[in-house]
Image (spheres, rainbow, N blue to C red):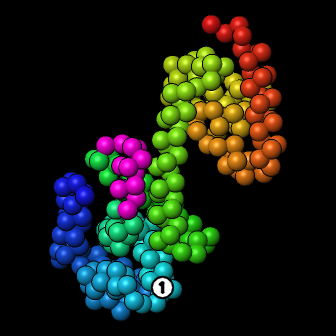
Amino acid sequence: MSFAWHEIRDHLMHSSSNLHFQRSFDAVRRAQAALAPFRDPAALLDGLHRTPGDQGQKNVILSALVEAAQGDGPAADCALTLLLLALWPGLDAIRRRSIWRRLGTADEVASDVLARTTEVVHVLDLGRVNWIAATVLRNVERDMIRARKRELAHDRLPDELEPLVRRTSERDPAISDARLNAELRSVIGDDALLVIRVAIEGFSQAEVAVELGLSEAAARKRYQRAMHRLRDALKGIP
């Protein structure tokens, strides 16, 4: 681990041991019955990190923390900190694999892991998730890999897309994605989203096929036809 990564965990651990944090933890305990047996954050983390134990009950505890973290105020911050510490071994494994994959520098990867974990926790749909830890960790690593794929794909944009991407990116960044989608749709119709996902965002044709409800073969043919139409339509763009 890098020293900075150690520092982040040490800071979280220190924060979880002060009186203010304990008060926030008590508020979370009162709101979440699954946390009632644990007198303090250290006892909770010890229970979650202990190898033996009821995995189903650990999942219930993590689910309670996610629900609390999706709220507001100090109690939500407390729950998020506990989630980060509870998932730390898995997050560290993602960090090491991400550095090996060259997704960024050590500091960039560390920051990205924590930021994406926070984002995933805040938007997690508890009604559709069976195993909290596995889902959060999988989504964080998937999003980091996809983000890198999008960067690489943007660096290798097909010649046909360069004029449109350049024109939209020179305008208001807040509307450039929507404008690009609209301009592509005016040229190639309903396959605009397919082209954006594959050629600009770096998703595989198989992944986009699932999103659009197509077979992989159908997605591949439609992508090829769309790129041919785009090439013919944009020959005149400087």
> What's drawn in magenta, residue-wise?
93-105
Identified at 39% across, 89% down, the residue is 52
Left/right placement of residue 198 relative to residue 209 reads left
Left/right placement of residue 133 relative to residue 28 reads right
Q: Name the chief secondary structure element in magenta.
A: helix
Identified at 40% across, 55% down, the residue is 97
Q: Is residue 203 magenta?
A: no
Left/right placement of residue 179 relative to residue 46 reads right
Q: Is residue 211 above or below residue 163?
A: below
Q: In this view, does 90 lie above or below 27?
A: above
**Quarter of image, res 89:** bottom left
Which corner quadrant holds the C terminus? top right
Q: Residue 167: x percent and y percent?
A: 57, 17
Q: Residue 119: x percent and y percent?
A: 45, 56
Q: Is residue 97 magenta?
A: yes
State the SS at label 1.
Answer: helix
Q: Nearer the viewer, residue 66 or 159?
A: 159
Amino acid carrying label 1: it is: Gln
Instruction: Determine if residue 44 is in view.
Output: no
Q: Which of 73 and 227 is in front in this view?
A: 227
Residue denoted by label 1: 55
